[in-house]
Amino acid sequence: MAQATSVRFDDTTDKLLKAYIASHNISKSDFIKQAVAAQLEDWSDVQAADLAYQEWKQDNFKTMGWQDTLKDLELDDE
């Protein structure tokens, strides 16, 4: 279920927002949804990278060669 949210902008931000949405032919709502989605995707990527780093750190920064990586991902031709 969608949730309504109210956002208040100062005059300068609102003026810039109106110019942007007019030039891109989108609604304020669509722009805000896109901006929030992009920010959340970036945050999610950072969280995934941090988790991967922590797992790598716990493994004493063990690395493997390209061929071993392909085998691990079951992408080798064998």
Image (cartoon, rainbow, N blue to C red):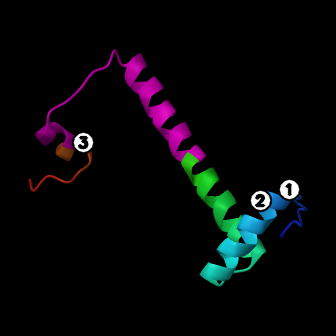
CA distance separating discs 2 and 3: 49 Å
CA distance separating discs 1 and 3: 53 Å
**What amino acid is labelled 3 in the image?**
Asp
For the residue pair 24 and 37, the one nearer the viewer reads as 24
Mark toward the start of the polypeptide (2 vs 3): 2
CA distance separating discs 2 and 1: 5 Å
> In the rendered structure, are the residues bearing label 2 and label 1 in contact, judged by CB atoms less than 8 Å apart?
yes
Q: Considering the numbered disc 2 on the image, is that residue within a helix, a strand or a loop?
A: helix
Residue furthest to the top: 60
Would you name the residue on which mark 3 appears?
72
Tag in front: 2 or 3: 2
Residue count near mark 3 (Cα–Cα under 10 Å), binned few <14, some 14–19, many ≥20: few
**What amino acid is labelled 2 in the image?**
Thr
**Quarter holding the N terminus?**
bottom right
For the residue pair 14 and 55, the one nearer the viewer reads as 14
> In the rendered structure, are the residues bearing label 1 and label 3 in contact, judged by CB atoms less than 8 Å apart?
no
Residue count near mark 2 (Cα–Cα under 10 Å), binned few <14, some 14–19, many ≥20: few
Mark number displayed over residue 10:
1
Tag in front: 1 or 3: 1
Mark toward the start of the polypeptide (1 vs 3): 1
Query: Vertically, is 65 above or below 19?
Result: above
Question: Which contiguous range is marked in magenta?
Answer: 43-69
Would you name the residue on which mark 2 appears?
13
Residue at the image position 8 percent from the left and 53 percent from the top: 78
Would you identify the image quadrant in which residue 22 lies?
A: bottom right
- Where does residue 24 sit, x and y in percent of width and height? 61, 80
Residue 2 shown left or right of residue 77 in the figure: right
Principal SS element in the magenta part? helix
Query: Vertically, is 76 above or below 19?
Result: above
- Where does residue 65 sit, x and y in percent of width and height? 14, 33
Residue 40 shown left or right of residue 1 in the figure: left
Residue at the image position 16 percent from the left and 37 percent from the top: 68
